[in-house]
Amino acid sequence: MDEEAKFALDTAKEGMDNALDYLEKEFAHMRAGKADARILNDIKVDYYGTMTPLYQAANLSTPDAKTIMIQPWDKSMIPEIEKAIMAANLGFTPANNGELIRINIPPLTEETRRDLVKKVKKAAENAKISIRNHRRETNDELKKLEKQGLSEDARKDYEQKVQKLHDEYIKKIDEKAQAKEQEIMTI
């Protein structure tokens, strides 16, 4: 029974890790007024008949805080990359000079900043809900294991460990959300 309880605890930790990873990916897609090539991570381009992530078809860089530069491995891909960026509807227009594509990141308005902060809070709350669900599922599993022979003291010990894990992850989420809000509101 003890092995199964440890497995339930490990499963909860893995689920909580996944929730935190997902939150970080969500935050990476929220632009904070400065250039970040991760904004383009989900864009796929038709690379000789295969839908390929943009970062695998071109070199992405940020030469300054307001510009993302895209240098395709094959210059004939420039129109295809521009089309994919426009289709992604990220709110900016690519410009090319025949060699590379530049994206100028426009400054955020106060209203846009407030909307982004709302999205940050919503994403953080969704991550917290996921963490709570993992805690609840693990505690339910521990109660089932108690009925199958796990001692009550062992169940309570594991529930305390799950609660400690829960508290650690909630704190991490709060810290990440606060840092992202501060990044967005900094002009």
Image (tube, grey):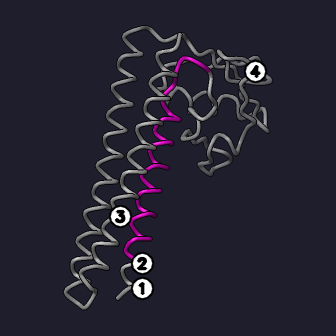
Q: Are marks 3 and 2 in contact (CB under 8 Å)?
A: no
Q: CA distance from mark 3 to mark 2?
A: 12 Å
Q: Are marks 2 and 1 in contact (CB under 8 Å)?
A: yes
Q: Which residue is mark 2?
A: 7
Q: Earlier in the sequence, mark 3 or mark 4?
A: 4
Q: Which residue is mark 1?
A: 3
Q: Is residue 146 above or below residue 56?
A: below
Please state which amino acid type lies under the numbered disc 4: Pro
Residue found at x 57% / y 42%:
44
Q: Is residue 32 left or right of residue 71?
A: left
Q: CA distance from mark 3 to mark 1?
A: 15 Å
Q: Secondary structure at mark 4?
A: strand
Q: Earlier in the sequence, mark 3 or mark 2?
A: 2
Q: Which residue is mark 3?
A: 162
Q: Are marks 1 and 4 in contact (CB under 8 Å)?
A: no
Q: Secondary structure at mark 3?
A: helix
